[in-house]
Image (cartoon, helix red, strand yellow):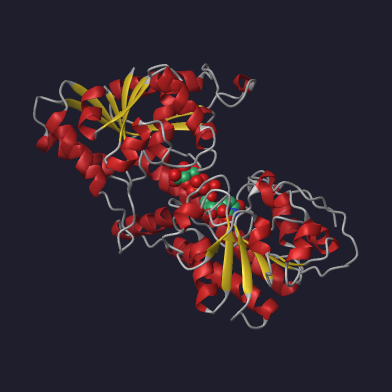
């Protein structure tokens, strides 16, 4: 099928590449001239595991093309809108990019189009789109509007697209449902060449859920808000653990064993970031407010999240006594591992706060340093974790990149000024780090000092924590 994807951000680019991977003819448009020229010349504008290889493969096969929005609108029978919906000052989602696309569709498209929202939008955006097309379309355009929310996580978006738990579509006509079913058929049946795994076709088929447009729009905001709520919940439990001397890893493990709760998204830390949760929670609160519902529960979720960085800085202060003049190594700037994205990353507020207090910050991130430079211009960027740790009074872990689990601790010990790790992501087992000669301070668990009796815990690669609670024996 001929499909257009409007917008080549993380979501649009992954959607376009994966739809081409499963056999469709895809045109992906991008309005930023520099980004479009990169894509047309085979240069990736962002880092996302597997995406570059998928794009190379499908371009070689002639199934993925890049160009302007106008060209995209003309190309596809089905148009996926994947443009940004950033937050406005009042918390509402800014829908001007969506409206801009609707205007081009109304003006340029002919025949029939299925206009599908993939961007995260407030409930009733589909209804607005329909109204807009009815009023402004020329050329006798026939159309349906559908919602097909994405549940892609940055860092695993290719895998999430090709092997989802569910595909949700919100439609108002059988024709729209049929077209979307046809598009996703290879994924539902798990019949395509997977660029990631060799044996993945044994996986469970995803649920294909058909709803009305408004419900589909709500499913997206409600899902992200619920996950954000889980994180803020465990972060408060972590505070309580610190206050009473309990261990949040054990508490989370015990909670997660209940299938009604589940182990995912119970990793405490310095708060959720990225371009989804913070803005989506905010937008969901606004949507509720405008509909006469006071979703104060989510206001607390936001409040707890906002307090995480300061709570963490307080730990650093407590250890260093005076922050001014201290050298602090920051490991990780991305809002989570396997991405170069620093939008709304806790690292930004954290580093700014330390710099404001007079610390000399030396940062290292495997992918995100380029993108961090405009938000954090006055710090030293280093080419590896050891360089960042040179002469450091504290090593502060902000993002749980795998490589932080595979370091030469003797080398680190010989390079730091003070052997202190303050871990905002609970990457390590405290006993392991103290055995390496470091004092270790983490979230919601007892601090561990060097030479403390050994605890039988195993260092794992940090990303193995994703979605699950590690087994730790006391
Ligand atoms: C999130 C959702 O997980 C996706 O399903 C959704 O499609 C996407 O938003 C979106 O709306 O586009 P993403 O923002 O890529 O995906 O990242 P997550 O893996 O959900 O992590 C979000 C934040 O929560 C990160 O800062 C992460 O460090 C933090 N987090 C996550 C925790 O602090 N604790 C956890 O247990 C899990």
Residue at left offset 25%, top offset 46%: 97
Residue found at the far bottom of this picture: 322
Q: Is residue 210 visible?
A: no
Q: In the rendering, at what x and y percent does residue 307 appear?
A: 53, 70
The quarter of the picture where the C terminus appears is: bottom right
Instruction: Give how far across and how far down residue 415 sits, in percent.
Output: 74, 64
Locate residue 82 relative to residue 310 in the image: left or right: left
Farthest right residue in view: 453
Above or below, 396 against 258 in this view is below
Query: Which one is in front, 183 or 20?
Result: 20
Q: Residue at x 91, y 65 (%)?
A: 453
At a point 46% along the width and 20% down the height, the residue shown is 22
190 vs 119: above or below: above
Quarter occupied by residue 325: bottom right
> In the figure, 256 relative to 424: above or below?
above
Residue 279: x, y in percent?
Answer: 40, 56
Quarter occupied by residue 38: top left
- Between 163 and 379, the one nearer to me in the picture: 379
Q: Quadrant of residue 171?
A: top left
Residue name at image x 73 percent, y 57 percent = 249
Q: Is residue 226 visible?
A: yes
Quarter of the image for the N terminus: give it.
top left
Q: Is residue 185 above or below residue 210?
A: above
Q: How many marks?
A: 0
Q: Relative to 189, is 236 on the left or the right?
A: right
Q: Position of residue 83 (x, y in %)?
A: 32, 42
């Amino acid at each position: 099928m001929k499909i257009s994807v409007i917008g080549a951000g993380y979501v649009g680019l992954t959607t376009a590449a994966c739809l081409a991977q499963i056999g469709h003819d895809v045109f992906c448009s991008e309005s930023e001239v520099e980004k479009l020229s990169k894509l047309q010349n085979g240069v990736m504008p962002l880092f996302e595991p597997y995406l570059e290889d998928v794009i190379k493969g499908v371009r070689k096969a002639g199934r993925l093309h890049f160009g302007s929005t106008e060209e995209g609108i003309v190309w596809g029978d089905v148009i996926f809108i994947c443009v940004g919906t950033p937050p406005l000052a009042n918390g509402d989602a800014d829908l001007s990019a969506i409206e801009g696309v609707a205007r081009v569709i109304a003006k340029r498209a002919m025949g029939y189009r299925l206009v599908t929202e993939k961007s995260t939008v407030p409930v009733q955006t589909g209804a607005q789109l329909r109204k807009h097309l009815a009023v402004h379309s020329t050329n006798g355009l026939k159309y349906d509007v559908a919602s097909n929310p994405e549940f892609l996580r940055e860092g695993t978006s290719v895998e999430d697209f090709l092997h989802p738990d569910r595909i949700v579509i919100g439609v108002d006509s059988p024709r729209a449902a049929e077209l979307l079913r046809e598009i996703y058929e290879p994924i539902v049946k798990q019949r395509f060449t997977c660029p990631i795994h060799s044996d993945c076709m044994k996986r469970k088929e995803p649920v294909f859920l058909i709803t009305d447009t408004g419900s589909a729009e709500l499913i997206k905001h409600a899902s992200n808000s619920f996950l954000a709520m889980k994180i803020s919940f465990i972060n408060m439990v972590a505070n309580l653990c610190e206050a009473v001397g309990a261990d949040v890893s054990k508490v989370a493990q015990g909670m997660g064993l209940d299938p009604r709760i589940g182990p995912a998204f119970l990793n405490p830390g310095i708060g959720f970031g990225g371009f989804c949760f913070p803005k989506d929670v905010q937008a969901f609160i606004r949507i509720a407010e405008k509909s006469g519902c006071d979703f104060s529960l989510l206001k607390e979720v936001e409040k707890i999240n906002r307090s995480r960085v300061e709570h963490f800085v307080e730990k650093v202060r407590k250890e260093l006594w005076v922050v001014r003049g201290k050298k602090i190594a920051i490991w990780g700037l991305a809002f989570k591992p396997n991405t170069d994205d620093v939008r709304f990353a806790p690292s930004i507020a954290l580093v700014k706060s330390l710099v404001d207090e007079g610390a000399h910050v030396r940062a290292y991130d495997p992918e995100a340093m380029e993108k961090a430079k405009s938000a954090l211009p006055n710090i030293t960027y280093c080419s590896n974790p050891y360089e960042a740790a040179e002469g450091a009074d504290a090593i502060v872990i902000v993002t749980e990149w795998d490589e932080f689990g595979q370091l030469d601790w003797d080398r680190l010990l010989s390079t730091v000024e003070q052997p202190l790790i303050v871990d905002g992501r609970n990457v390590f087992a405290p006993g392991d780090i103290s055995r390496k000669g470091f004092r270790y301070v983490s979230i919601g668990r007892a601090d561990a000092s060097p030479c403390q009796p050994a605890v039988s815990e195993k260092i794992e690669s940090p990303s193995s924590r994703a979605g699950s609670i590690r087994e730790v024996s006391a």
